[in-house]
Image: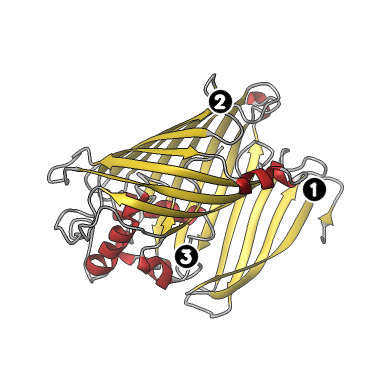
């Protein structure tokens, strides 16, 4: 690796190659900047990237830049306070802002922590061609204040995690979006475990469609956090439109992915469509201003997991799971005319994950899933029991 280094600072470049349907092959460079020997945990931290799309779209050059500076007075080992500056123009989206972060770590165990973040930003979707489903996005200018809090620890049952996120948008039609998620793992032994997740999401009237909820997947505004889902075409669009590709998050009633995607295509990709006119085949609203759900996964013994656990060193990072799952949820009818009724599904699944946590203990890797939702309470084809195939990226429950 080439290193540009002085006595006080070093820049570590690495090549980057990716693909989407607008940029085509996107080539560029990632840059890590740090004080030598601090291993991404010191002052003056830089994380940046610059790319060129070889299909040369309207805006072929894109970039991402994040700079973090610790606040020494409020920091201790593992419990850093910092100021961060972010600027990004990529995949048709503006995101520019400044953040304050504070973390409290329990002793030397980076898996146990509390974390607070406040982020003020300007954001705008300026090119919907990058989005897999254009109806799920607005082109409004937005000025946000985002608050987030996370707690991770363990108790006598196992690991647990709590996340709270709330965002206030001030320009034009102001709105507020709040989500809460709580996860508890109950570990019986090395191969048997029960994982429970409760989730609720609220968006006031006037919220733009990218912040509203579908039953099955995370809201559209959260797709940009992962390179696989950031832009149209990295996952082939034909695969998404078949309804067999699931993006974990949100209410996560995974068995309803196909019917939700059908609604995006059939009703939403029309000129002038918005969240109030996106209807599914039954005439109820596709996107929810309020939703609450419960997700449960029961891990069970399987010989492949045993084999993975015997691999020296790699078993610390590579994991294979087999599990049964159950999801249920409903709208809270937070605004007038929001659909009523509840939705549930059950099935079986398998996942393969590679996770190498960063210096803060945060997950860093990938998860591939194959799931079979064999029962739906409200199927679109009136066949509750049926073999359905679902492939997924990311895990809604992970530690």
Q: Which residue is mark 3?
A: 231
Q: Earlier in the sequence, mark 3 or mark 2?
A: 2
Which residue bears the numbered disc 1?
Answer: 9
> Residue 209 vs residue 157: left or right?
left
Which of disc 3 and disc 1 is earlier in sequence? Answer: 1
Question: Mark 1, residues whose alpha carbon is within 10 Å: few (<14), some, or many (≥20)?
Answer: some
Mark 3 → mark 2, Cα distance in angstroms: 34 Å
Q: From the viewer's perspective, is residue 336 above or below residue 50?
A: above
Q: Is residue 334 visible?
A: yes
Mark 2 and mark 1 lie on one chain; the one further toward the N terminus is 1
Of residues 137 and 237, the one drawn nearer to the viewer in this rendering = 237
Above or below residue 338? Residue 24 is below
What secondary structure is marked by label 2?
strand
Q: Name the residue tied to disc 2.
A: 153
- Image check: 78 left or right of 196? right
**As drawn, which residue projects farthest toward the top?**
156
Disc 3 and disc 2 in contact, CB within 8 angstroms: no
- Element at label 1: loop
- Quarter of the figure that contains the N terminus: bottom right
């Amino acid at each position: 690796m080439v290193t540009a280094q002085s006595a006080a600072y070093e820049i570590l470049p690495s090549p980057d190659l990716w693909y989407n349907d607008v940029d085509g092959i996107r080539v560029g460079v990632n840059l890590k900047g740090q004080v030598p020997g601090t291993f991404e945990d010191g002052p003056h931290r830089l994380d940046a990237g610059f790319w060129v799309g070889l299909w040369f779209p309207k805006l072929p050059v894109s970039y991402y830049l994040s700079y973090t500076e610790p606040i020494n007075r409020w920091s201790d080992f593992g419990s850093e306070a910092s100021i961060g500056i972010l600027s990004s123009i990529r995949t048709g989206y503006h995101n520019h802002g400044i953040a304050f972060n504070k973390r409290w770590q329990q002793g030397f165990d980076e898996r146990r922590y509390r974390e607070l973040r406040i982020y003020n930003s300007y954001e705008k979707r300026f090119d919907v061609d990058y989005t897999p489903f254009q109806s799920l996005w607005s082109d409004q200018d937005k000025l946000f204040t985002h608050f987030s809090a996370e707690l991770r620890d363990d108790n006598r049952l196992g690991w647990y995690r709590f996340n709270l996120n709330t965002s206030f948008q001030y320009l034009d039609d102001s709105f507020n979006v709040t989500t809460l998620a709580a996860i508890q793992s109950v570990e019986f032994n090395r191969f048997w475990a029960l994982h429970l997740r409760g989730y609720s999401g609220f968006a006031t009237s006037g919220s733009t469609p990218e912040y509203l909820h579908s039953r099955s997947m995370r809201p559209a505004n959260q797709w940009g956090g992962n390179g696989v889902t950031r832009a149209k075409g990295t996952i082939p669009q034909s695969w998404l439109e078949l309804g067999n590709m699931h993006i974990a998050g949100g209410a996560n009633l995974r068995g309803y992915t196909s019917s939700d995607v059908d609604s995006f295509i059939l009703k939403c990709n029309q000129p002038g469509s918005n969240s109030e006119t996106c209807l599914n085949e039954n005439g109820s609203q596709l996107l929810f201003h309020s939703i609450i759900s419960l997700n449960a996964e029961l891990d069970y013994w399987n010989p492949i997991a045993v084999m993975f656990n015997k691999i020296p060193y790699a078993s610390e990072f590579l994991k294979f799971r087999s599990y049964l799952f159950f999801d249920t949820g409903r709208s809270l009818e937070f605004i007038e005319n929001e659909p009523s009724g509840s939705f549930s599904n059950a099935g079986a699944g398998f996942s393969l994950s590679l996770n190498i946590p960063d210096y803060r203990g945060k997950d860093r890797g990938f998860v591939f899933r194959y799931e079979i939702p064999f029962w739906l309470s409200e199927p679109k084809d009136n066949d509750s029991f049926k073999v359905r195939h679902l492939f997924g990226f990311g895990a809604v429950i992970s530690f």
